[in-house]
Amino acid sequence: MAVVLSQNLLLDQYKEKLVSADEAVKNVKSGDWVQYGEFVMQPKDLDAALARRINELEDVKIRTVTISMLPEVVKADPDRKHFILNDWHYSGVSRALHEKGLCSYIPLTYHEGAKLYEEFCDVDVAFVPVTPMDDNGYFNIGTSNSIGSYARAKAKKVIVEVNKSVPRCLGGNSESVHISEVDYIVESSTNPKLYNLPEAPVNETDRKIAGIVMSLMEDGACLQLGIGAMPNVVGSLIADSDLKDLGVHTEMLVDSFVDMHESGRVNGQRKQIDKGKMAYTFAMGTDKLYNFMDNNPVCASYPVGYTNDPFVIGQNDNVFAINNALEVDLYGQVASEAAGPRHISGTGGQFDFIFGAFRSKGGKGLICLSSTVKLKNGEIASRIKASFAPKTIITVPRSINYYVITEFGVALMKGRTTWQRAEALINIAHPDFRDELIKEAESAKIWVKTNKQDDA
């Protein structure tokens, strides 16, 4: 619990706890579990200092979430003899490292993060990137709340890395850590700007799918957008629409929410909880987003145990959860994190929000994907599959899946038999693959004589 201190006492504590990065990482011992930052909030000086200790340490296990930098500890230890990097949700960086055997995935149902740390995860040392301390002795944790507060609570030692470039992101709750809860303070040597997420390329199929999503939306909808081109297109279309009184309760805050807010489409006035606020657990975007978030009370940072709890999500009416996927099979199962043995991302909050949207009065959980994909060998393959390749991971089970959307339309999964699902999904598959999918459905005994195929 934070202790109220005078300015002089705060400054005295600050000076006592201020050390170099090299001094701070001496707290890490062989065999320890070390918590790194999350998303664009990653420790730079502490990571470099830990890498410099490579010859002193063995079996140091690191946890992170969607790492946005190539860690110095990995560069220093390409054989993984000293440092073992683990990621709760793969980024492009961790995916590339995984393919080289240098990063391991940790399966996670995101909203369960608190209990996972409380009961199952050891944390010996936590590296926490933060803003400079305020006049009340608090360091703000910036754009990533997520599971960080759970890791800090479990950590035996908490080391903050102060970066003057980090925006001060208001809560919500758990958005700050008090100096009394900190063991050591390290000041960044470079104060690096936060990573800017490259703009995802948009194609005509993305625009068609986004247009279908828009046709389902109504005034007062409460939005969750996943990562990728298509959700960003939806955001742009909303900003240019005449929709009114939209709310935001999301896992990820992205640039398009800035456009929606500044256009007057998003005001949160019809939300049942966090009225008027854009509730989120982490942000990834560009400086436009980070500057918008800085000291902005309309944005409310929460731990993921709040934003992603399906029972919390369902308290808002008309939740529109809009997410991408890699493949959907004819039973309605969704694969969003792996294609066969190739690991791409993670479960993330997709399961949480599809489940939560169903609990929401008037809510809709939307799995969106193009009907086809171009493979590396140049072939075109259907993303509506009769069955998944071996080792494919199921992200959303058929019992939880709600709606599936391609550029050819909408398929409702809830309350539908296996043969109704097969028919609905085949009708939104690419026409070139429909006959083949029907044969597969007949073979699997999920096609009946009354099934009809809509015209393309």
Image (cartoon, helix red, strand yellow):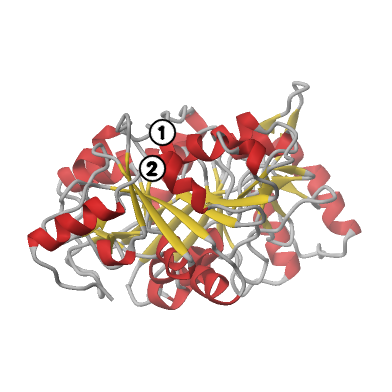
Measured as percent of width and height from the top left, residue 28 is found at 55, 52
Residue 112 left/right relative to 15: right
Q: Quadrant of the N terminus?
A: bottom left
Position of residue 317 relative to residue 353, above or below, is below
Position of residue 172 relative to residue 338, above or below, is below
Measured as percent of width and height from the top left, residue 201 is found at 47, 27
Q: Residues within 10 Å of mark 2 (few under 14, many from 20)?
A: many
Residue 222 lies in quadrant: bottom left
Q: Residues within 10 Å of mark 1 (few under 14, many from 20)?
A: some
Q: Secondary structure at mark 2?
A: loop
Q: Mark 1 or mark 2: which comes first in sequence?
A: 1
The residue lying toward the viewer, choosing from 46 and 335, is 46
* Res. 33 in view: yes
Residue 36 left/right relative to 240: right
Q: Residue furthest left?
A: 7
Per the image, the residue denoted by label 1 is 197
Measured as percent of width and height from the top left, residue 100 is found at 74, 33
Per the image, the residue denoted by label 2 is 284
Residue 243 left/right relative to 349: left
Q: Secondary structure at mark 1?
A: loop
Position of residue 274 relative to residue 63, above or below, is below
Which amino acid, by three-letter code, is at mark 2?
Met
Position of residue 114 relative to residue 224, above or below, is below
Distance from the alpha carbon under mark 1 to that under mark 2: 6 Å
**Residue at point 44% right, 35% down?**
207
